[in-house]
């Protein structure tokens, strides 16, 4: 099958080695630049940090929204999905759920600028949400089946719990474990 004749249609194909290195360097530089300079950091600054010409960045990413979406995708693949996969292997369903929520709250508090940029650019897609909600739902279901997690919780409650703990963290550094603990107490089936 031949490539589309429309020059505006992007065909996904494997990147050459140098292009793959540039792509990885741009994503790493963008994450760092956003976290250091905030969500409004210039794309020229990202290119400078990556050691590439701005034209190289623009050849790969049409603009800020596309770059932020790629950085978020990279963050989820590098941090969130491995966290969820490790939790799936933990035998104790309560410990697995607690570990994931602690990891997510810690990650969100450390990467606030990236997540703010992702929210501002619309990078949170339904597909990306589904990739995290499905495993969270499985962990929640395991805890409910074991009788250690309240039965009225739904998977969509868990990102809200993370958000609530992160908001309390803004009141003072290092305080989120206490507040997350209080939230977890409300999620757990009381021991008799």
Image: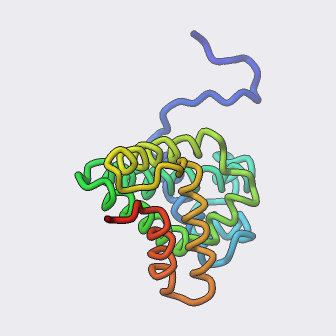
The colour scheme used here is: rainbow
- Horizontal arrangement in the rendering, residue 145 relative to residue 61 (left or right): left
In the image, 22 versus 148, the foreground residue is 148
- Horizontal arrangement in the rendering, residue 167 relative to residue 99 (left or right): right
In the image, 89 versus 46, the foreground residue is 89
For the N terminus, the quadrant is top right
Q: Is residue 31 above or below residue 88?
A: below
Identify the residue at image location x=75%, y=55%.
121
> Looking at the picture, how far across and down is residue 65, in whole percent?
73, 52
Identify the residue at image location x=44%, y=75%.
181
Q: Is residue 176 above or below residue 90?
A: below
Q: Is residue 82 above or below residue 109?
A: above
> Looking at the picture, how far across and down is residue 117, in whole percent?
69, 63
Identify the residue at image location x=37%, y=51%.
143
Q: Is residue 185 at least partly visible in the picture?
A: yes
Q: Which quadrant of the structure image shows residue 87? A: bottom left
């Amino acid at each position: 099958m031949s490539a589309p004749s429309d020059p505006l249609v992007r065909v996904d194909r494997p990147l050459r080695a140098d292009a793959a290195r540039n792509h990885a360097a741009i994503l790493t530089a963008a994450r760092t630049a956003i976290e250091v300079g905030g969500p409004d950091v210039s794309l020229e600054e990202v290119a400078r940090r990556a050691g590439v010409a701005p034209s190289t960045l623009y050849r790969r990413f049409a603009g800020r929204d596309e770059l932020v979406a790629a950085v978020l995708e990279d963050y989820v693949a590098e941090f969130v999905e491995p966290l969820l996969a490790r939790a799936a292997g933990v035998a104790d369903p309560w410990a697995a759920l607690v570990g994931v929520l602690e990891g997510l709250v810690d990650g969100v508090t450390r990467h606030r600028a990236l997540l703010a940029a992702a929210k501002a650019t619309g990078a949170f897609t339904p597909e990306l949400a589904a990739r995290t909600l499905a495993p969270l739902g499985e962990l929640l279901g395991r805890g409910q089946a074991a009788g250690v997690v309240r039965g009225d919780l739904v998977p969509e409650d868990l990102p809200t719990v993370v958000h609530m703990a992160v908001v309390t963290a803004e009141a003072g550094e290092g305080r989120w474990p206490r507040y997350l603990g209080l939230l977890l107490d409300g999620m757990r089936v009381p021991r008799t």
